[in-house]
């Protein structure tokens, strides 16, 4: 997203072009078949699939007044083609062979495995990619701290152990394309959380994030995301508060593990007053006001 209302359906979020540091791909959920095709091609050719946030209603029934899930769109297309005994073709390049459910239907997230074959390459092995549909509670457009961690758990489980991701040429993308209805809220929150979570748990003490440097890193990554996705990346003060609370809990969890295993301790403030005060993210908000998104 470039700050306008034009739907740009995939952006790189991460270091500058040319960097070898891993990056994330984010976008808006597709509501047209042509956009679905483009998104599926990206998921197939990256080998990493798609992770989609949807409303709880859409998660349960396949659609709501605002969106139809990718899995529902795919299932409906397969049924339409089956009725006329036609193959379902994606972007003129891939024929859909199978779409298999990997997750119980009453779960807050469901995971499927899409199998396709390359048209014109009949001897080639079929390609398989995972598709995750996450229907976490999003009341008042806020993903709470516990749901942020659960969303990351679903992201970790996205690539099944039985599936070896294909080698990627010329890319450092490490996760699936992560999409949501607006493309700047839940997926932005998950991406920021995952990036900082990995730094909190880094084996490299020099890059590790703790209570002292958390706000600086949070500000840095939100600014970076706003340059890629527009000025509402991590879309509200309330969402920022939940994101920060989830990261504080991740820091405390790592400290507990370090203490139990007698490894080198990490350094962080043990006083909770700062992050439970009326404005626990004042530093981040001040930083973002000083440096408007461009």
Image (spheres, rainbow, N blue to C red):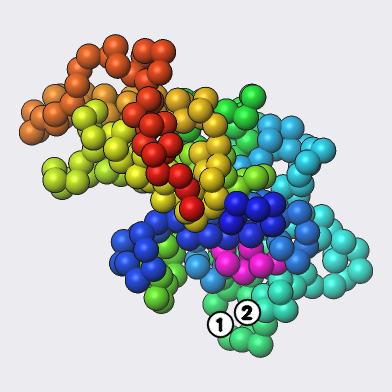
| Visible residue check, residue 61 | yes
Q: Which mark is residue 124?
A: 1
**Quadrant location of the N terminus?**
bottom right
Instruction: Name the spot of residue 136 as percent of width and height, x first.
Output: 60, 32
Task: Reply above or below: 221 against 35.
Answer: above
Judge by depth and name the residue closer to the eye, 96 or 201.
201
- Expressed as whole percent of the image width and height from the top left, the position of residue 37 reads 70, 67
The residue beneath circle 2 is: 118
| Mark found first going from the N terminus, 1 or 2 | 2
> Callout 1: helix, strand or loop?
loop
Task: Report the side of 69 relative to 261 (left or right).
Answer: right
208 left or right, relative to 131: left
Identified at 77% across, 69% down, the residue is 88
Look at 29% across and 38% down and name the residue there: 216
The stretch in magenta equals 37-43
Does residue 143 show up? no
């Amino acid at each position: 997203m470039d700050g306008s209302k034009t739907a740009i359906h995939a952006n790189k979020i991460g270091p500058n072009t040319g960097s070898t540091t891993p990056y994330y791909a984010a976008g808006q959920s597709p509501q047209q078949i042509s956009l679905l095709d483009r998104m599926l091609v990206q998921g197939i050719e990256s080998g990493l699939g798609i992770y989609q946030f949807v409303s709880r209603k859409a998660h349960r029934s396949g659609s709501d007044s605002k969106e139809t899930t990718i899995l529902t769109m795919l299932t409906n297309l397969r049924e339409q083609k089956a009725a006329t005994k036609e193959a379902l073709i994606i972007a003129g390049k891939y024929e859909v062979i199978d779409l298999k459910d990997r997750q119980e239907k009453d779960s807050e997230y469901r995971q499927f495995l899409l199998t396709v074959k390359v048209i014109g390459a009949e001897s080639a092995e079929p390609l398989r990619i995972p598709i995750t549909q996450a229907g976490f509670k999003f009341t008042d457009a806020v993903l709470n701290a516990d749901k942020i961690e659960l969303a990351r758990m679903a992201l970790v489980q996205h690539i099944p152990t039985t599936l070896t991701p294909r080698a990627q040429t010329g890319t450092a993308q490490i996760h699936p394309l992560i999409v949501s209805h607006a493309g700047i809220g839940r997926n932005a929150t998950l991406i920021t959380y995952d990036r900082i979570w990995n730094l909190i748990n880094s084996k490299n003490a020099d890059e590790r994030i703790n209570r002292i440097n958390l706000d600086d890193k949070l500000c840095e990554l939100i600014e970076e995301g706003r340059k890629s996705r527009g000025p509402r990346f991590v879309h509200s003060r309330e969402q920022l508060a939940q994101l920060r609370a989830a990261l504080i809990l991740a820091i405390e969890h790592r400290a507990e593990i370090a203490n139990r295993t007698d490894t080198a301790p990490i350094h962080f403030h043990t006083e909770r007053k700062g992050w439970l005060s009326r404005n626990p993210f004042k530093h981040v908000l001040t930083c973002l006001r000083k440096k408007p998104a461009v």
